[in-house]
Amino acid sequence: MGDDDTGNANLADMLAMDAADPSEKLAAHATVLQSQMEEIAEEIRELIASQPPVALLGYLLGQTHIALMYEASESEELPRLNSQTLQQHQLALEYAHAVWSSEPDLPAENTRLNEEEAAKLLEAFERLSKTTMLYCMASSAASRDPERPNLAEMQFHAKSSWSLIRGHRYQVLEEEFFRYALRPHDAALRSAYGMNSGQVAASIQGIADSMRAGFSNAAEGMMQRFEQVNALVDVTGDDLETVMKALAVADDTFMSSTADLMKDMLFGGTSNLSRHTEMTQPLLEDLCFLPGENTEFFGEGSFRGTPMRTLPARIKPGVKLGDEYYAPEPQFVRDAAYRAIQRGVCARLPYRDEWLKRQGAIAEEAFPVIFSKQLTGAVLHSSVYYRDVESGNWAETDLLIAVEDCLLVVEAKAGTMPMHSPATNFKAHERAIQDLVVKAYRQCQRFIEYLYSAAEVPIYRLADGVYTEIGRLKRADYRSILPIGLTIEAFTPFSAAAKELPEVVPILGNFPFVSMSVDDLFVLNRFLPTAGHLLHYLKVRQAVAGIPSAMLFDEVDHLGAYISRNRIDIDIREAMIEADLMTLDAFCEVVDRYFEGPDWDAKPVPSQSIPTTLARVLAALDALKPTGWLAMDNALRDLGGDARDRISSLISDLEPTLREKTQRRFMMDTEEPLQVWLCRIGHPPDPIEFRFGAQAACLSLDASQIRVLTLFYDKSGTISQMSCAIVSAPSPLQRDFGAIREKADWLKVKAQNL
């Protein structure tokens, strides 16, 4: 399990200090910490503003590469910074962007970089980070409200996430996201920027690739040129200086490309939008601040220049330095670029209403489009209308997805970023989250209440002002109901905390609500390749959402926990017996590691450990989809490691015996009892024997019911047919109850002797 968050432990200590340190003292302490943050921020502003920007950018990026060198090891894995060091380096780049965006008069680039002064920056950022976290704890603990017992925890999560929201934007997926998100606006992008959506997406991927791998590519290129020059020295017999002068005269391309490589290595060239993208001038202008254009971040007032204000990089990820445009910090490019493009297009064209309309459509279509492979054969209903149970008025839900006995109720919302800072205006910040989360929750709640208002309910489509019935839904048909709120915004730390909002409780007491972002779906799509994978993950995700005061940082942590621990919700519930508040982290590493390195797409996707034979059974379930297949798939994926090994081993051992016998069977005493039949094609179990054996197994295991999986093998030994069933325990009134009881007793004795 991931490490418990130290900040939350300290927050819990503060909350426990009722008598010794009441809210007034905590508030006073928070005020002192706020002043300290402002003082450090001003110190940082002065240090950055006194240095030549491009040279300082190269210095800061160089410090990151030096830190990575110290992290290098003999393992095959790429070196990576620990989270604290990474946050410190990212914060440095974000503040450099903030100062350059706020200062109209920056030093000329021929000004000499003062490395002694520049070296003070990283130490100052370490102080700023620590002071900011202490402020988040003290100010949150001081905000306790008897009517909202979890308000302090909510504020702490919101404030700390606001200062740390970076690091889970996988740069290799930028083009994929932007192609999807910008495709509906293709004509408007052509008109505003002279670029179509694919070209804009490719350019954003280009700068992401440059910032991710540009330094190593430049170093490799310089080594090749060094070898080339040395080879010319050997061939010509001339000295190095003579060869270099000859190259300068004979090969302009060689010298100019070498100069570009030097810029990438030493002067922040890997962040240069002008050189590493095909962006047109209008697009560059809309994505980048001019020096001094941002007047809010360092403007007078509370939290001046601190992480508790809105960093300019959240608004526009780039800044113009000299004649060129730079995006110093890569993690905000996706988050800020999408809204910056929206604002830019709508400022240049009369397109605002159309943008919002089309944006809403892509959010609503995201699930079936991105998960098209997993949802093949699913029944989809979009823009479904029905009569609200309370008011009787017509209401709409965005999307219903029925997969076997699982129903997904999806509501899409398109908010606007950046949100208000939770420190400067927590109510407005919370209201923005409510607009994205609570409204979707209420709409999901309204539909599920309608579904449960009768044994069978009609659903309608609206066309030309007429409501036409398009189907009927029976609540008894659905073993699982998943209410999901989806937004175009990448705000997963906030959505992960959404369940702590007072209103967001399990719908009808049984269906916890899950909030996700569209960009999360692209990651999940790679790791959850089948319907069984996806829906089992969503089941676990929903179960965690239903555990109050237990929090994983974002969707990537949820995914990493699922890969590493499978039923992480069970682990959390057991741990929560002795805890009031739990925040888990570090689970994201298994996902982060996959996306690192130049060959990331060729690597196998990390997955849970599933024995080969059990994997074959799951693949057959996904391919054949017999009635009840999803519930059976779910039950098999619920099994822990030992149970997975055991069922896989039993099936493997019994498969060869079908050459002599037509049928074999076994049962497993798992949390959800299971019986498995292995049969030759054409030799199904006798119905009476099938029922008798299953009911005897129920009695032997003291279970109310048992799941029965029947596998049919063809002559080649391939599973070519399957059936899934649930058999209930026998009634004492059954005529053969005595015989069943006798068989059950025999099974118990047999199990004890194994």
Image (cartoon, rainbow, N blue to C red):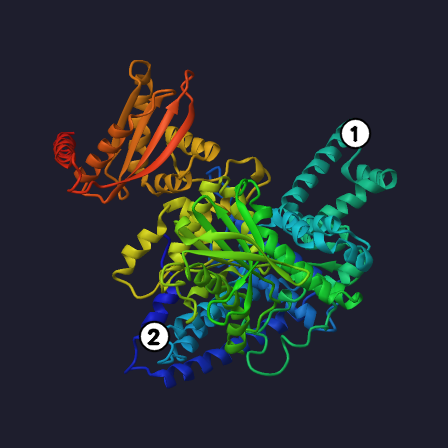
Q: Which numbered tag is attached to residue 80?
A: none
> Mark 1 falls on what kind of element?
loop
Please indicate, yes or no, whether residue 695 appears anywhere in the rendered image. yes
**Residue 245 shown left or right of residue 464 in the figure:** right
**Residue 465 shown left or right of residue 646 in the figure:** right
Q: Nearer the viewer, mark 2 or mark 1?
A: 2
Tell me the residue at 51%/78% (across/down): 427
Residue on which disc 2 sits: 14
> Considering only vertical position in the picture, is 13 above or below 199?
below
Which amino acid, by three-letter code, is at mark 2?
A: Met
Tell me the residue at 32%/72% (across/down): 13
Q: Position of residue 303 (x, y in %)?
A: 55, 78
Residue on which disc 1 sits: 237
**Residue 198 shown left or right of residue 78 in the figure:** right
Which amino acid, by three-letter code, is at mark 1?
A: Gly
For this rendering, which residue is in front, 345 or 481? 481
> Considering only vertical position in the picture, is 3 above or below 146?
above
> Is disc 2 surrounded by few (<14), some (14 to 19) or many (20+) residues within 10 Å?
many
Q: Position of residue 483 (x, y in %)?
A: 47, 57
